[in-house]
Amino acid sequence: MYTDKELLERISENDSTAFTILYRRYWEEMFVVAVKALREKTNAADVIQDVFLSLWNRRHTLKIEGSLINYLHTAVRYKAIHHIEKNVTRRDYLAVLADVSVNWLPPNAEVDLQLEELQKALSSAVTKMPPKMQQVYILSRQQQLSHKEIAEQLSVSVETVKKHIQHALQLIKTAIQYTPTFISVLISYLF
């Protein structure tokens, strides 16, 4: 029956039992926040582990102004944003953007314009790809063909297909990852 402040004080003195109490008190709530943001339980659990590990590792120097629950919510959201940014090349951008727009964001003209801008940036990046890379990317992302199916259709190796996809996703990531619109949509999505 310790308060958050008391637990944090005990944690700063290397009390692992206090840390366990704090972890059990907030893990489930933070997990729900992370799952909502990432829509995937394994990655959400990893984000939560990172947040609590960071809390433990910084226990001697951590100064939390305000409530611990607000601190944890903010930490989870930022870790989720970082996770999305780091792993965004593994996703189908248009599907993610459409899902965010339809299922997670309230109707908003400004967000709709931002999503449209991102979709234009994506389309522009695809049209600037070399022809073979563009063809592989379109077969993979728009026609949902496997690497093996693409390799057979284009008479190339599966490794060649993988390389084209990797390079295509890197070009797309470079084209849209650091745009203010992309960050704005992610933040809107998570808050």
Image (cartoon, rainbow, N blue to C red):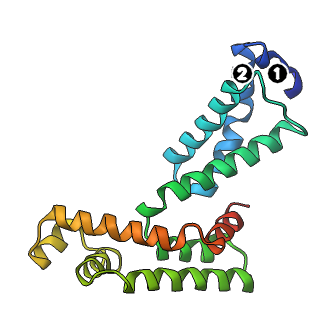
Q: Amino acid at mark 2?
A: Phe
Q: Position of residue 88 (x, y in %)?
A: 48, 61
Q: Position of residue 189 (x, y in %)?
A: 67, 66
Q: Residue at x 26, y 69 (%)?
A: 164
The earlier-in-sequence mark between 1 and 2 is 1
Side (left or right) of 156 relative to 183: left
Side (left or right) of 47 relative to 89: right
Q: Is residue 39 visible?
A: no
Q: Do the numbered discs 1 and 2 sit on residues whose CB atoms are within 8 Å? A: yes
Marks 1 and 2, Cα distance to the nearest angstrom?
A: 7 Å
Q: Residue at x 69, y 51 (%)?
A: 77
Identify residue for label 1: 7
Q: Residue furthest left?
A: 155
Q: Position of residue 190 (x, y in %)?
A: 68, 60
Identify residue for label 2: 19
Q: Quadrant of residue 1?
A: top right
